[in-house]
Image (tube, rainbow, N blue to C red):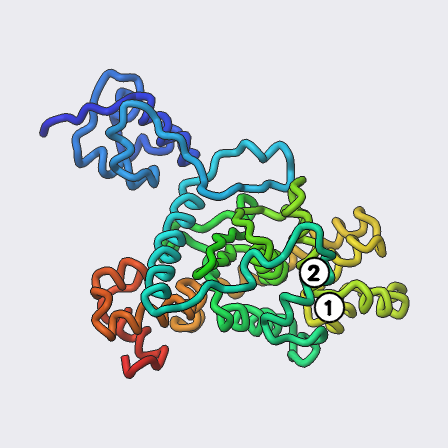
Amino acid sequence: MSKVTVSVEVLRWALDRAKLKADDLQHRFPKIRQWIAGKSLPTLRQLEDFARATRTPLGFLFLEEPPEDRLPVPHFRTRAGDAMAKPSPDLLETVQTMQRRQAWMRDYLLEQGHDKFSFVHSALPTEQPQLVAQRMRHVLGFESDWAASQPTWTDALRTLREAIEDVGILVVTNGIVGSNTHRKLDPTEFRGFVLVDDYAPLLFVNGADGKAAQMFTVAHELAHVFFGSSAAFDLREMQAANDPTEQLCNRVAAEFLVPEQALRQEWPSVKGEPEPFQKCARRFKVSALVAARRALELGLVSKGAFLDFYYAYERDERRTLARHAGGGDFYANQNLRVGRRFASAVVRATHEGKLLYAEAFRLTGMYGKTFDRYARSLGILGA
């Protein structure tokens, strides 16, 4: 079988990009050391397998020089030493997939005659966080104590996510790349990202992250939409990067979830309790992690006390997730992974003959009968 000419630098780049070494793939490609030494060349089939193994688009492997991997949005890292880290193939592919969905949704809405959303870019950096948080609640149709009526904070998270979708924002929560369960997204690289658009703003939440942190991530992302700022972020230890907009979004998210005045009134009655953060969490219907973070921000607890609680809480949550890993309702999972608002638009367009099934499959990542069953579960137009 004929060999394919490929740049040694590009092969090494693909390995480095995937955080792999030649030894990691030696069993799969016995001559890989010769390839990266320039002493041998792979066949086309071997190169295709290599592309899959390194999660590299095949076309990149035919370039003479390695391409520059760059996210289309700023990537804010909480720790300054992480600022120059290259985005992983998993993050890049996820952002690119969301961009394709957003572009389709924007075109669909324009075709339907939709207007721009007035709340996008509506907040100014000079505004007080309390005012921006109040506007966010108003747009969502929430009162200041909106979460109090929810049975638990997980119910409040679901209510928040659904309300955001209802006002026109695309919301996706996924812990893997597409539907590939072997490619888990890394919460230490990013907790989420926002793609701001006047017609189809999109929030992506890393579902591999603990649910306790996801609530704050969603509120932080919503603030980004109001400020009109696209970004990816890791929010390490639930702290923003050293960027003015990131820090402002954090303050707005905190005020949106746990209003300062209300917490200051509540704190004297709980601070001497064995579990003050849990008591605040029950009052505000947020996770204890979010309550602890807000207490830190307002200077009610020391950073050391917060970090002790933070790491203990995360360890407990990881154990809980491990015990309950896998399974779940298929349709509920797809509503999260694809996004209810986006999926509904795709199903309508397909039903009306405006979108080919092949394109609907590509956009949603669901194929054949799986797509049909999910479409019927949405109850749209008798799909």
Residue sitting at x 51%, y 71%? 167
Which residue appears at 56% of the width and 56% of the height? Answer: 121
Which residue carries the number 1 mark? Answer: 281
* Label 2 Cα crowd, 10 Å radius (few <14 / some 14-19 / many 20+): many
Marks 2 and 1, the one that precedes in the sequence: 1
Up-down: is 290 above or below 76?
below
- The percent coordinates of residue 77 (x first, y second) are 60, 41
The image position of residue 259, as x and y in percent, is 76, 65
| Above/below status of 189 relative to 143 | above
Query: From this viewpoint, which residue is outermost toward the left?
Result: 1
| 261 over 145 or under it: above or below | above
Total numbered labels placed on residues in the image:
2
Kindly report the distance in space between the C-alpha atoms of the residues bearing marks 2 and 1: 8 Å
Q: Quadrant of residue 47?
A: top left
Q: Name the residue located 27 percent from the left edge and 63 percent from the top edge.
A: 360
Quadrant that contains the C terminus: bottom left
Give, as a three-letter code, the residue at label 1: Ala
Q: Is residue 327 visible?
A: no
* Residue density around tag 1, few if under 14, some if 14–19, many if 20 or more, within 10 Å: some
Q: Which residue is mark 2?
A: 290
Q: Which labelled disc corresponds to residue 337?
A: none
Q: Are marks 2 and 1 in contact (CB under 8 Å)?
A: yes
* Helix, strand or loop under label 1: helix
Residue 35 in sight:
yes
